[in-house]
């Protein structure tokens, strides 16, 4: 993961510094009146976050599907579901 590059006031030169820090793997928060308003994050960090989120969502979906399949009761044929929802 990336390390923090610190905070910078959100001015013209700050963007250049923030980009340079991102090139070196650092996250930089941009501030207005001392309050954080945005962050410049290395692309590789964003990809890692997206991959982790997708994996977590896939695991949650799989767990929900397993739980649904384990529910007692009779299965409903797809044809019946499709007909009820006008999908045929």
Image (tube, helix red, strand yellow):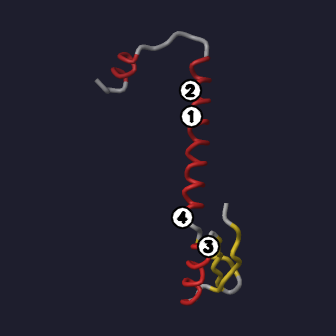
In the picture, which quadrant includes the N terminus? bottom right
Cα distance between the residues tagged 3 and 2 = 42 Å
Please state the horizontal and vertical placement of residue 42, each as a whole percent of the image. Answer: 58, 67
* Upstream in sequence: badge 1 or badge 4: 4
Judge depth for marks 1 and 4 and give the one in front: 4
Question: Marks 1 and 2, Cα distance to the nearest angstrom?
Answer: 6 Å
Specify the label residue 61 is tagged with.
1
Please give the residue where the numbered disc 4 appears in the rendered image.
Answer: 43
Answer few, some or many: residues within 10 Å of disc 4's Cα (few below 14, many 20 plus, some between 14 and 19).
few
Q: Mark 2 touching mark 4, by CB under 8 A?
A: no
Q: Earlier in the sequence, mark 2 or mark 4?
A: 4
Between disc 3 and disc 2, the foreground one is 3
| Inter-mark Cα distance, 4 to 3 | 11 Å
Which of discs 3 and 1 lies nearer the camera? The answer is 3
CA neighbours of label 1 inside 10 A, class few (<14), some (14 to 19), many (20+): few
Q: Residue furthest front?
A: 24
Q: Secondary structure at mark 2?
A: helix
**First reached walking from the N terminus: tag 3 or tag 1:** 3
* Residue at mark 3: 24
Compared with 61, 73 (above or below) is above
The image's mark for residue 76 is: none
Discs 4/3, front: 3
Instruction: Categorize mark 2 by other alpha carbons within 10 Å: few (<14), some (14-19), many (20+).
Output: few
Q: Tell whether 21 sits left or right of 34.
A: left
Percent x, y of residue 10: 60, 85
Q: Position of residue 29 (x, y in %)?
A: 65, 76
As drawn, the label of residue 65 is 2
Of residues 60 and 20, the one nearer the viewer is: 20
């Amino acid at each position: 993961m990336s390390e923090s590059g610190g905070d910078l006031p959100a001015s013209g030169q700050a963007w250049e510094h923030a980009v340079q820090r991102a090139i070196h793997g650092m996250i930089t928060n941009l501030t207005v009146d001392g309050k954080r308003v945005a962050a410049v994050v290395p692309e590789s960090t964003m990809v890692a976050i997206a991959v982790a989120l997708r994996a977590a969502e896939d695991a949650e979906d799989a767990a929900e599907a397993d739980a649904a399949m384990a529910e007692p009761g009779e299965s409903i044929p797809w044809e019946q579901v499709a007909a009820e929802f006008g999908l045929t």
